[in-house]
């Protein structure tokens, strides 16, 4: 690992291996309309969603701020006022 080049990632403020950043750049996460998503983006729900494990329903048009990408290309991690640790599928959101 000593021969691996490190690159400063301005988004996280850390020095990261170049191979790790290249793998992330190759990965493309898109919303329901095909727009690319990135960490920190705000998204809008395109349909009402019942949240498993709660009696809460998130309504269409609800804005979710500061999303985080996960290891899976079709899921994003986010937080809502009433629900912590919410994971949404990208097919139900549109970039704002």
Image (cartoon, rainbow, N blue to C red):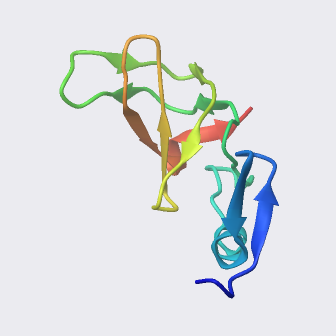
Looking at this view, name the residue that lies furthest to the top.
81
Residue in the foreground of this view, choosing between 82 and 48: 82
- The picture places residue 53, in percent across and down from the top left corner, at 18, 27
Give the left or right position of residue 68, taking residue 18 as reference. Answer: left
Residue 28 drawn at (x, y percent): 66, 66
Please name the residue shown 58% across and 83% down the image.
1
| Residue beneath the point at 51% across and 42% down | 92
Dividing the picture into quarters, in which one does residue 55 lie?
Answer: top left
Q: Residue at x 81, y 48 (%)?
A: 10
Q: Quadrant of residue 4?
A: bottom right
Q: Is residue 48 left or right of residue 3?
A: left
The residue most toward the front is: 2
Taking the image as shown, residue 22 lies to the left or right of residue 70, namely right
Q: Going 47% across and 40% down the picture, which residue do you hit?
A: 77
Q: Would you place residue 69 above or below residue 74 in this image?
A: above
Of the 4 image quadrants, the one containing the C terminus is top right
Q: Quick one: 59 or 95, which is closer to the camera?
A: 95
The image shows residue 70, relative to residue 45, as above or below, that is below
Q: Nearer the viewer, residue 9 or 89?
A: 9
- Marks counted in the figure total 0
x and y, in percent, of residue 49 in the image: 38, 29
- Comparing 74 with 84, the one in front is 84
Tell me where residue 21 sits by quadrant: bottom right
Question: Would residue 70 be found to the left or right of residue 6 on screen?
Answer: left
Return the residue found at the far left: 53
Where residue 6 appears, x then y in whole percent? 75, 71
Compared with residue 90, is residue 79 higher up or lower down, i.e. above or below? above
């Amino acid at each position: 690992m000593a021969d691996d080049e490190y690159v400063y990632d301005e988004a996280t403020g850390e020095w990261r291996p170049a191979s790790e950043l290249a793998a992330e750049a190759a990965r493309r996460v898109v919303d329901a309309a095909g727009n690319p998503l990135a960490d920190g983006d705000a998204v809008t729900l395109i349909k009402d969603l019942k949240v498993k494990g709660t009696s809460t329903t998130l309504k269409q048009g609800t804005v979710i701020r500061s999303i985080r990408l996960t290891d899976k290309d079709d899921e994003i991690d986010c937080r809502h006022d009433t629900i912590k640790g919410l994971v949404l599928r990208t097919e139900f959101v549109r970039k704002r």
